[in-house]
Image (tube, rainbow, N blue to C red):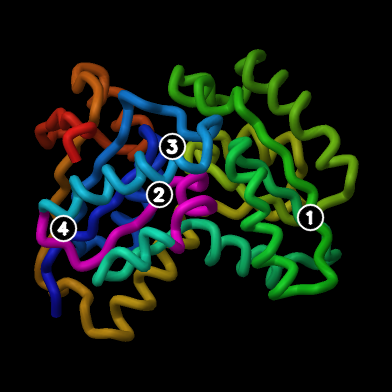
Amino acid sequence: MDNRPIGVFDSGMGGLTTVREMAKQLPNESVVYFGDTGRVPYGGRSRDTILRYARQDVAFLRTFDLKAIVIACGTVSSTALAELSAEQEIPVFGVVGPTALRAAQVTRNNKIGLIATKATVRTGAYERVMRHANPMAETFSLACPLFVPLVENGRTQPGDVVIETVVRDYLSPIRDAGVDTLVLGCTHYPLLTEVIQNFMGPEVTLLDSGAEVVRQVRERLYASGHQAAENRRGTYRWFVSDTTESFTELASRFLGRPVTEPVGQVAIERY
């Protein structure tokens, strides 16, 4: 048993959907979450900048006695996972690998859609894993830069003409391509699941990258004996790099439950 917490970070708030999955799949685990809200988004940044930011995020999290780190950010996972893993002596998990592998396994017609940030699409990381796991798979990738600000402004519900219009404009080419599996390659996107599913149709399987990486974390923890004791309840600590004032309301929306724990502000440039 290992009751040390798991560190989770994202460029902003989207990684909270991964924490939500952790609460479901790993309710005994404690979490230290850092959202780099002062520098969000990472998606349009250069590779060098993303790597520098990610190293600072990890350096802050390592001030806690962690047993693992989850990169709850598609952009960082696709750009910097190899470097971050090599630099740490504890396991570092990214959202790309487990989600891409799952997509390659569940597709029925070998046509897979991927929606993500520009930086994630640019790396081709998802495509490489899918192609290795399923050489017959054809991937249709698309950057959807408007999804993140719309999600963070609460435009996520069916019937909202703004988000439904943007979803239709972005996803029409992918739907027309006949994909039967769609990877939500940014951790903000699960909040749009209902709107996206309505547009794509019930026959298309949506894959939540946060849910897939948590499944991988759970398997690794139990295989190595590092899971938390089953007689305890996980605790949560929240940190952001910008003002904490709006965090509670927005985080409650991402987590699907009220946030009652205190929130700390971090001067992330010091790390």
Quadrant the N terminus occupies: bottom left
Kind of element beneath mark 4? loop
Residue 133 is drawn in which quadrant?
Answer: bottom right
**Which residue matches tag 3?**
49
Residue at the location (29% across, 51% down)? 8
- The magenta stretch is 64-82
**Which residue matches tag 2?**
72
**Which residue matches tag 4?**
234
The mark closer to the camera, 1 or 4, is: 1
Residue 35 is drawn in which quadrant?
Answer: top left
Residue at the location (36% across, 26% down)? 39
Three-letter code for the amino acid on which mark 2 is drawn: Ala
**Residue 83: where, in percent of width, then height?**
41, 60
**Which residue matches tag 1?**
139
Residue at the location (60% across, 23% down)? 146
Neighbour tally class for label 2: few under 14, some 14-19, many 20 plus, Cα within 10 Å: many
Q: Residue furthest top?
A: 161
3 or 2: tag closer to the N-terminus = 3
Neighbour tally class for label 1: few under 14, some 14-19, many 20 plus, Cα within 10 Å: many
